[in-house]
Structures are given as structure tokens and as C-alpha cells.
Image (cartoon, rainbow, N blue to C red):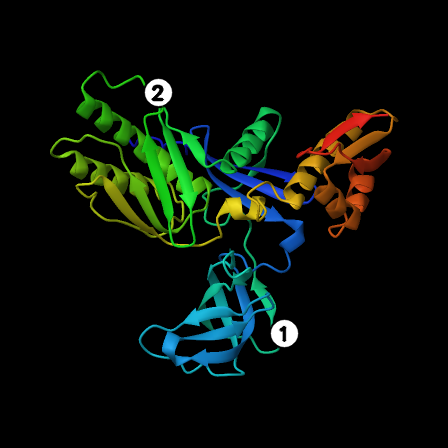
Amino acid sequence: MTAPPRASTREILIHERIGELRAALLDRGRVVDLRLERWSDHDSRARWGQVLAGRVSHVEHRLAGAFIEIGAAQPAFCPWGREKPELLRVGQAVAVRVVREAEPDSAADAQKGATVVLEGEAPAGAPCPSLLEDVPPWHGWPGEPREAEGEEIELLDAAFEAVLSVEAPIPGGGRLTVETTRALTAIDVDAAGRQSGGRDPARFARDLNLAAVPEIVRQLRLRSIGGLVCVDFTGPRRRGDAEALTKALVAAFDAEANGGVAAPKTEVLPVSRFGIAEIARQKRRPPLRSRLVGPDGLPSAETVALDGLWKLQQALGRARGRTVVLAAPALALAWLEADSIGWRAEIAESVGGTHVLEAAPAGARACEVFER
């Protein structure tokens, strides 16, 4: 008798708020991946997986690639490998697929353009630039999403909030510190008061390091971190521990693709005798944290404002005719008053009620709502 198919342990939850859509991939009830789609850049950001019509603006033989105007702030780069395709000539209309999104370049105070691959000639009559094939924010995840409800919304919000921190707990005790520089991401494994593992220092270190491995992979996914990653595992170590850690890392990254997830290509080098693991992970999107924080490392004006709008939306639903005040810090208040995303019209249509904006007390970092 054929065994019935196993039910999927993965589930996609989405939470659509005014100004943004948040999506999470859950595995056995735990958030393992996050996506963010904001109204403010929906029409200007080329997203991983989209197919676009563009026009070749420049061919750079030294880089073995061509630059394609796709309607974004910076032209996209299309590498050609060993041989230059005939289509990649200046002025040619081409269809390209986005394989890496543009990301901020903090050192240059600018933005690096997207990376694309050539799909062929653009369809006849297609405007250049234009969108030929769109993808949902959860592109690459298995299954269809459902709207989060109640405590599930709190679960998603907590996951996005955790991404703002450079620290992440290791199950069973211990802590990861995740810090991204222009060149690489450094992850430090620290005991941080962990109790399990016995009194033997070598066994304690081995147990801590192996417990950290799945959380390292999870944090890279949650934070959308790619490129070079260096992990500093803790010591002391016995013979064979480095090989065990390498195998555990490889297995954890392999497990990411189980169940149909379109996982980034990842290469793991053997853990060195100094306890350092080097990981090369394909970049697809900018780090999620870079889309949530400003240059000062604190939540950006848009992030603070959108959190305030969510509080306002909930408060208006309970107000029963009373006026709701949204008090916002100065930069978030300026962002709200500009109303570049049309949130006022959305509030009026979806919730209604009466509300006013005002400045929050000096030093406040978050929006607050109250009735008047």
C-alpha cells in the first residue's frame, strides 16, 4: 500500500498594511524567511525574478558585460560570460531577468544597479523600459500564501523587529552577533551564559557550535544576507570538531532547498583550525535591515511612519466616532505630512473615522496613538 504524501511543514503568511506588505515563510510554525514590499518603491525597484524590457546603453568589454536601461535609478548590469551575445549591442531592445536586485552603496552614498541575465530580444512593440513578467513578493517559496490573523500578525511583526538587532539568541542558550560591512558579514558565536553542555570545555564548545549552525542559516535567510560570510565559532576544540561543523553547515544549507524553496547558491569552505567558517552565498536582494533602517542605524522615517499608520488603522477601528491622534517623531511626521504614498486616501476608504497628526515629544523614537 502506498503511503499518503506527507503534509508540507512550510506555510506562507502575508500581512498587508498601509504602505507595505510583509511576508514570512514558516517551517513548523517558526519564521525562517522574510520579504518586504513597500508602496514607496514598488514601481521603481526591479525585483528578483521579474522579466523586463530594456535597452542596451553601454557595452563594457573590460567587465564582460553590458549596461541595460530598465527604468531604475541605475542601469542594470548584464554579464555575458565567455562570449558576447550578438544582441548585446548599444541601442538594442532586449528582455532581461533580474537575478540580483539593486542595493545601497553606503560608502558612495549611491545605489548599485541590479544584475540581470539576457532572456532574448524584447517583444516587438514592447516599450523600453517596461515590465514583461511580474512576480509576487513570495516568489521562490512553495505554495500559496494566506493572510495572517491575530497572534500570527504579532509573530510577523516580532520577526521584522528582531532583524533590526545585531544579536540573535541560539536555541538552548548562547548568542550570535551579526554585523555586515561593505566587504562581508561577520558572525560571532558566543556562549552568553549558556548552561547546557556539561563541565568539559571541549564538549561545551562543540555542543554550542553545533547548536548555532541552524540558527546561523536561519539568520542569513531572515536578514537576506548574501556575499561573503565569515563565522567565528567558539573554542576550545577537539580533533574532528572542524569537520563536524563543516558537515553540519553544508547539511543546514542543503535543507533550505527541501520542500521546493528556491534557495540561493551557497558554498561552504572547510572550517579552519582557527574555528573560522567561510561561506559564499549568492546575493539576490539587499539586506533586509538596509531597507528598514536609516544611515544612523536606527529605524528610518518611513519604517517609523508605517508602524504608526498600522497603530492608527487599529485605533480608528476601535474609536467609535472619537478623534484619534497620531503623534510622530519629527522625521516620521514630515514623511507622513508629505503623503507620497497616498495613505490618507487609503485610511479614509478602508477605515474612515477622524484623525489628526501632531509632533511627538522630543526624543521619542516611535509613533504613538491616543484618543481625544
Per the model, the C-alpha gap separating discs 1 and 2 is 60 Å
Front in this rendered view, residue 180 or 307: 180
Q: Is residue 21 left or right of residue 312?
A: left
Q: Amino acid at mark 1?
A: Pro
| Position of the C terminus by quadrant | top right
Front in this rendered view, residue 322 or 132: 322
Q: Quadrant of residue 242?
A: top left
Helix, strand or loop at disc 2?
Answer: loop
In x, y percent, where is residue 74? 56, 67
| Position of the N terminus by quadrant | top left
Q: Quadrant of residue 324?
A: top right
Q: Is residue 257 above or below residue 90?
A: above
Q: Amino acid at mark 2?
A: Gly
Residue pictured at 49% horizontal, 56% vertical? 48
Q: Is residue 15 above or below residue 224?
A: above
Q: Which residue is mark 1?
A: 127
**Which numbered mark, 1 or 2, is in the foreground of this view?**
2
Taking the image as drawn, is residue 17 in sight? no
Residue pictured at 36% horizontal, 33% vertical? 215
Helix, strand or loop at disc 1?
Answer: loop
Which residue occupies the extreme left position in the image?
Answer: 239
In x, y percent, where is residue 91? 54, 83
Front in this rendered view, residue 30 or 107: 107
Q: Which residue is mark 2?
A: 193
Q: Is residue 148 above or below residue 286?
A: above
Q: Residues within 10 Å of mark 2 (few under 14, many from 20)?
A: few
Give the mark, 1 or 2, whose residue is nearer the N terminus: 1
